[in-house]
Structures are given as C-alpha cells and as structure tokens.
Amino acid sequence: GACSVDDVEDACRYCAPQWERNKERDVDYIVKFILEECSDTMEADKRFRLLQSKVGRRLHGRGVLTQDVLTAAQTRCHEYWARVTPGNVALVVANVTSRSANWDSADKKFDWLWRKGEWNLEKRTVKLAQRNLTAEDLEQAERQVRRKFG
C-alpha cells in the first residue's frame, strides 16, 4: 500500500542521523583536500569557485557534492585560515628546512615541536622562541616542508 505521513516522518527520523554523518564525512573530505592543496585563503577560495561548478556531481567514491557541503567546507576552511599567521609559518618552515637534509629529518623536528612545546590547550597554541604558534601554524608549516622535500 501507500505510505502514510507518519511512515514518511518515521523514515526521515531514522535516516536523518546517517544523512548528517554522510554530510560531515563529505565536508571533512573537502576540507582535507583543500588544506593539502592550498597554502592560503586566496588559493582555497579559487578551489572553492572551481568546486562550485561541480555541485550535483559525485565526490570521488563518496556522496554527491551539495551546496550545503560546499558552504560548510568553505566556512570550516575560513575558520582554519583565520588561525594561521603567515609570518609564524614562514619562520617555522625556514628554521626546519635550514636544519634538515630531507623529510625524515624535518619530520623528527616537527615531532619534537608537537611534543615538547609549551602548549596552551584552551587556545590550541604553543609557545616557541617567544612566539605563540597555533596548531594550524604548525600544520601549515609541516605541509609546506613536506611539499618542499617531496
């Protein structure tokens, strides 16, 4: 027979949590991709403009790119980039690359920074060389150094 309004509402209540998890997974996927590929907000915004034309298409082995997913990912990326200070990133990149012959050597220095720094967990910052670096500063520096060493 036909579905009643209650049947449809029950189905929506049952499916909504999974739809939300799928949306979050898709947002996470796009954010990870953007952060790996872009080194600043302007580059990220260019990528988002390109993705805008792909709304409605399938994400690589995932769900469909919707405007909601794209907007949520862009918001999250903007929040991330607001916590990145280019001067801090440049300082860390310069210090690590000048003292490293390859990625393995640089990776050990980043491990030390992540473990030995004086962290303020509330603010997600670490004090190094009289500077407060955000976790995002360190992540960005690590990405740039990894790219540099291939």
Image (spheres, rainbow, N blue to C red):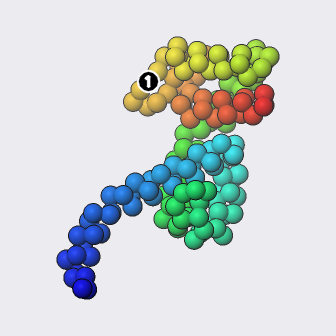
Task: Give the SS element for disc 1.
Answer: strand
In the rendered image, is residue 74 in sight?
Answer: no
In the image, what residue type sits under mark 1?
Answer: Asn
**Nearer to me, 122 or 116:** 116
Q: Residue at left 59%, top 18%? A: 111
Q: Looking at the rendering, in which quadrant would you find the C terminus? A: top right
**Nearer to me, 127 or 5:** 5
- Left or right, 71 with reference to 57: left
Q: Which residue position holds label 1?
A: 120
Quick one: label 1, few (<14), some, or many (20+) residues within 10 Å?
few
**Nearer to me, 101 or 63:** 63
Residue 122's spot in the image, x, y percent? 39, 30
Picture quadrant of residue 32: top right
Q: Residue at left 61%, top 56%? A: 60
Above or below, 140 against 102 in this view is below
Residue 93's spot in the image, x, y percent? 71, 26
Labels in figure, total: 1
Farthest front residue in view: 1
Above or below, 58 against 4 in this view is above
In the rendered image, is residue 30 in sight?
Answer: yes
Above or below, 6 against 44 in this view is below
Q: Residue at left 71%, top 16%? A: 105
Residue 22's spot in the image, x, y percent? 44, 56
Q: Residue at left 60%, top 29%? A: 138
Farthest bottom residue in view: 2
Residue 62's spot in the image, x, y percent? 54, 57
